[in-house]
Image: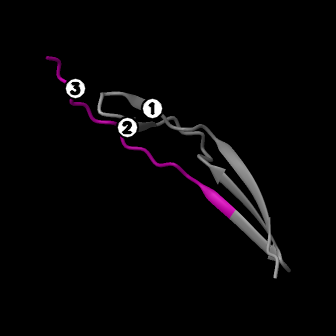
């Protein structure tokens, strides 16, 4: 049996969001991992596997509220 104990290094991921509402419309911009830091997310199952965290990415959303 192999030793599967290991520790991931510490990391900080910087995210940001901007939200603007005008009337019944709402626009939101989200940015993730602004510094494009490489990091591991940890185990994704009962086996010892680690996933690489997402690189810099963003999302834009818009909504409209019907009254």
In front: 47, or 33? 47
- Give the residue displayed 66% in from the left and 52% down from the top: 31
Q: Residue 45 in the image: state x and y as whole percent.
A: 35, 34
The residue at the point 81 percent across, 82 percent down is 67
Q: Could you tell which of marks 2 and 1 lies nearer the N-terminus?
A: 2
Q: Nearer the viewer, residue 14 or 61?
A: 61
Instruction: Give the CA separation, mark 3 to mark 1.
Output: 16 Å
Is 17 on the left-hand or right-hand side of 10?
Answer: right
The disc label shown at residue 4, or none: 3
Q: How is the image coloured?
A: one colour
| Residue bounds of the magenta highlight | 1-17
How far apart marks 2 and 3 lie (CA) works out to: 13 Å
Measure how far apart labels 2 and 1 are at the Cα level.
6 Å
Which of pointers 2 and 3 lies earlier in the amino acid sequence? 3
Count residues near mark 3 (Cα–Cα under 10 Å), then give few for <14, some for 14-19, many for 20+: few
The residue indicated by pointer 1 is 51
């Amino acid at each position: 049996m192999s030793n599967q104990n290991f520790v991931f290094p510490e990391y900080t991921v910087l995210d940001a969001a901007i939200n603007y509402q005008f009337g019944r419309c709402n626009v939101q911009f989200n940015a993730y991992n602004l510094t494009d830091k490489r990091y591991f997310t940890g185990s994704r199952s009962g086996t010892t596997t680690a996933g690489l965290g997402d690189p810099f990415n963003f999302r834009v959303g818009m909504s409209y509220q019907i009254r």
